[in-house]
Image (spheres, rainbow, N blue to C red):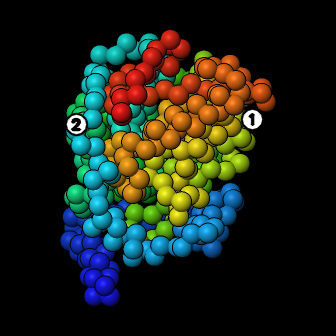
Amino acid sequence: MKKFGKMVAGLGTALVVAAGAGWSHYGPRTGYAPSGVRLARIQQSPHYKDGQFHTLEPVTVETPVAGAKRESTLKLWTDFLFGDHSALYPKQTLPHVKTNLRTLDPAANVLVWMGHSSFYLQLDGRHILVDPVFSGYASPLPLKNFRAYPGSDIYTPADMPDRIDVMVISHDHWDHLDYDTQLALKDRVQHVVTPLGIGEDFERWGFAPDRILEGDWYDAIPIDGGLTITVLPSQHFSGRLLQRNGTEWGGFAFVTPRHKVYYSGDGGYGRHFADIGRQFGGFDLAILEDGQYNVQWSKIHMMPEEVVQAAFDVRAKKFLPVHNSKFTLARHPWQEPLERTAAALSRRRAAAGQGGGGQTAEGAAVPRFVTPLIGEALRIDDDSQTFTEWWK
């Protein structure tokens, strides 16, 4: 077993070396440390100290679990790379509908989910693309474990509208910031909005500096056409290879005179959700991270039951679970996030004596759990639109 452990550790080292070996090929993919004026701005952030960004509430990437033996990083990687994967991947192609984004009614307020955390949002005439990953993998190397499920990879950069008003990137992890996708979309994107520091990558990748808009947590960034995007905190971390937390991570509020939409980005549960709900007075739709969790890293990824609580906290009328159904980045069954979230919301309704909408005993509105197929257009203003439990 000791020999096997060394082999796995060696494999992990080999993957890191492979990612950096051919620098001409992998160098741009790994990203760049912020420098110059960008670094000076970062150093003025109240969330940055000792050379790193920090969460609002102190968190650790690996969380001790009361009453449970801590699994070593080596064992986690061993299980992930060589363990039983039979429940981790769908056995059939995922059901999907490929909405033609180019022919959508420009006046329609819709969201099209593309699996994991990639989605296209059309809001009061603005075309917004969030965390697009279209290369087929959630890693710098084409490893089987990080490959997109069949049916979740139906969109390519060529399917995006000719004009994307805003592309939003929540943080620099591989499953949210994809080098090949960015290069393919570069000429279509009018503005890039990111938390602090990520603009360094975009500038080095050839995006015009005046198109890159970076904000610290709670910064409101005005966009043409009455859209304001506010960068918001999340309980997570950043880093593309060996350096960690040199760039910021976050969620976003998309606000127009008529609509408010919230995207959590990646992160654990925290009091920031209730603060955001109070600050914005609720949202028409919340897109919440729900997947790739483990009790051992529950401070940086929410458990499904916490996703339901977050939907209440931000005062969402509807909430859409994302960060699932495309990649296997944790060892829970692929459909478990949706099953547990549906069950948790059902329990909340039952405890309040409700079969559907309305309010809990505390007076909080019960949000609708919306589960469109990958590629299906979610109509933000249509409360009569129905969805299936397609993962069953």
Labelled disc at residue 93? 2
Residue drawn 40% across the image and 15% down it: 106
Question: Quarter of the image holding residue 30?
Answer: bottom left
Quadrant containing the N terminus in the rendered view: bottom left
Labelled disc at residue 278? 1
How crowded is the residue under tag 2: few (<14 C-alpha within 10 Å), some, or many (20+)? few
Quadrant containing the C terminus in the rendered view: top left
Secondary-structure class at tag 2 = loop
Which amino acid lies under the numbered mark 1 shown in the image of this protein? Arg
Residue drawn 32% across the image and 28% down it: 375
Cα distance between the residues tagged 2 and 1: 41 Å
Q: Earlier in the sequence, mark 2 or mark 1?
A: 2
| Residue 34 appears left or right of 57 | left
Picture coordinates of residue 368 (x, y %)?
56, 24
**In the image, residue 251 above or below residue 299:** above
Secondary-structure class at tag 1 = helix
Kindly indicate whether the residue at mark 1 contacts the one at mark 2 (C-beta within 8 angstroms): no
Residue situated in front as seen by the camera: 197 or 367:
367
Residue drawn 71% across the image and 48% down it: 271
Which amino acid lies under the numbered mark 2 shown in the image of this protein? Thr
**In the image, residue 62 above or below residue 180:** below
